[in-house]
Image: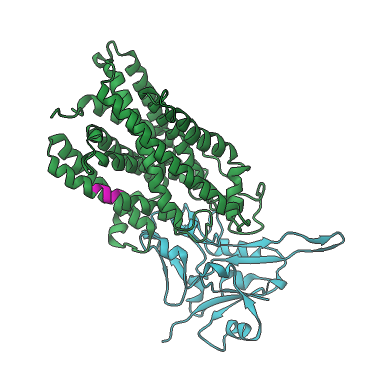
Chain colours: A cyan, B green
Amino acid sequence: MKNKRFAIVLDTERCIDCKACTVACKAENDVPLGPNNYRNWVVASKLRGKYPNLGQSYTPSQCQHCSNAPCEHVCPTRATFTSSDGIVDVKEEKCIGCKYCQTACPYNARYYNEETGAIDKCTFCAQRIYAVPPRLPACVDTCPTKVRAFGDLNDPNSEVSLLLARNPSKVLKPAMGTNPHLFYLD
Amino acid sequence: MSAFKNRPKLFVWMAILLLGMAAGAAGVIHVLIVGHAQSYNVTREIPWGLLIATYVFLVVSSTGLCLISSLGHVFGMKQFEFIGKRAILLAILTLLCGFGAIGMEINHPIRMGIYTILSPNFSSAIWWMGTLYGVYLMFLCAEFYFLMKGMHKGAFTMGVLGFTAAVSAHSNLGAVFGLLEARPFWHGSFLPIYFIVSALVSGCALIGMIVYFNHKKSGAPMPLKYADFMDTLGRLQILTLMTLVFFVVWKIIPGIYGHPPEKYEATMSMISGPFAFNFWFFEVLMGLVIPLCILFPKKTRTPTGVMFAGLSSTIGIFFMRYDLVIIGQLVSMREGTAELVNGLLQYTPSLSELGITIGAICTCLFLYTVAERLLPLDPEEH
């Protein structure tokens, strides 16, 4: 069977900064309490304009599942690896907690999980997407305004492929050369 | 207690070191009981803190001692030969204490031992750094053994290998930071080269202190031969310090010229931001200016002057390491991160981190002081 190339496409115009994605992710993935512990987040831009003409944008994000992942290059024990379907994941038993990947990631997508004793990060909710029947990642599923779409870029008819075919998009920090797989519609 | 009879200074010195080691032990016990997250002030955004800086400081010291002492038994500069045993011994101890500091910083040192062998990643600078420092430690130990046994050929061979390993391992330590494209303040080929240069400064500084205090403890005036050596060392230190000044200047200028994104904010944090005091007072004044002012005039380039210059630059270099490690992480990877002061992240070491740092340095000095009394470290007379 052909490998998949999982990706998320985001339409940030729809984001209302409710942070339901962060809450759903924490509940789904047993993310411990504490300000350092989260797998996804929403960045609120600075306020634009002057009162009463104000504007603000919100950018939800998470691990970009880069196909040229700096975290994978720097990991001394190959605890961080990319699966055949493009998911950047961590083998917990190999993680030595050196935090090199945390300093290498340009997106600050990683944290050290004291409960599992390893670096933790978004896995596109692997436990859900490979379930039978498959389910969407928690952040995608829970979003009240459907900011995120999840799917397989190797399937030309998937929702993500169609969105990227029909709309211009960009990635975060393209100059880093990481080749991210979170796409933001313009 | 007979060792301390008529030696009140030694007693006070050892008592201070033991207190420092107790602080380290308290820090270690605290971490073992409550865990890293509760003990350290490192965060998700600033994951490397004081202990990484301490590790860098100690291994830079080790490398510097190895490189400078190799001037004698590797490069055949006779004047430097007599420092060999002491320098290599202190190089071993600083390296081991450095390993101790990083061992406390990383969460799973035992897994590290297993998986760096079973599942090595050859594209990881940390893997190379760790492996090369391991090899370097073996060469240092062998070199020390041969020096102690008076086996010059073996010491020379191990010295050459140790020198090569020191340069490789240490430039790789620079690469651990320099290969991170995400951190513009660190990224590039500058750091691997800079680390070697600053190791030479550390090496000269520590050797000056070793020679001075070694003679101080004997109570006898310093023989002319050693006083001459201190003068040569002082002049060599001027050269290494001036080279370091050059590196500091050329680190700053590209950091501010044209306001390169992220690099500019990080550089400015040490010019006029939260790290300005560390930079101007410790790095520039204590690390560079005071030592150079002592060493330049022939009148003050005495054994005592060279020792003071060494002490001052060693303190300065500690802050250079700390500032380098922390400043590289001050700029947030995300715009709009909450709780930023002046647009920068913040980090202050915790008591445990401070305790372990003090403990690591005191353990190193304690072991050296004990070894100085137990081992025949004086050079054989030819």
The magenta segment is B162-166
Return the residue found at the far front.
B298
User: Which residue is depicted at the point 47% across and 68% down?
Assistant: A69
Q: Nearer the viewer, residue B317 or A26?
A: B317
**The C terminus of chain B lies in quadrant:** top left
User: Which residue is depicted at the point 35% across and 60% down?
Assistant: A77
Return the residue found at the far top.
B6
Q: Nearer the viewer, residue A30 or B288?
A: B288
Residue A113 image offset from top left, x and y in percent: 48, 55
Question: Is A180 drawn above or below residue B360 in the view shown?
Answer: below
Q: Is residue B370 magenta?
A: no
Question: Is A12 drawn above or below residue B115 in the view shown?
Answer: below
Name which quarter of the figure residue A49 lies in.
Answer: bottom right
Query: Could you tell whether A15 is left or right of A102 in the image?
Result: right
User: Which residue is depicted at the point 22% across and 50% down?
Assistant: B161
Query: Could you tell whether A52 is left or right of B97 in the image?
Result: right
Q: Is residue B163 magenta?
A: yes
User: Which residue is depicted at the point 59% across and 56% down?
Assistant: B262
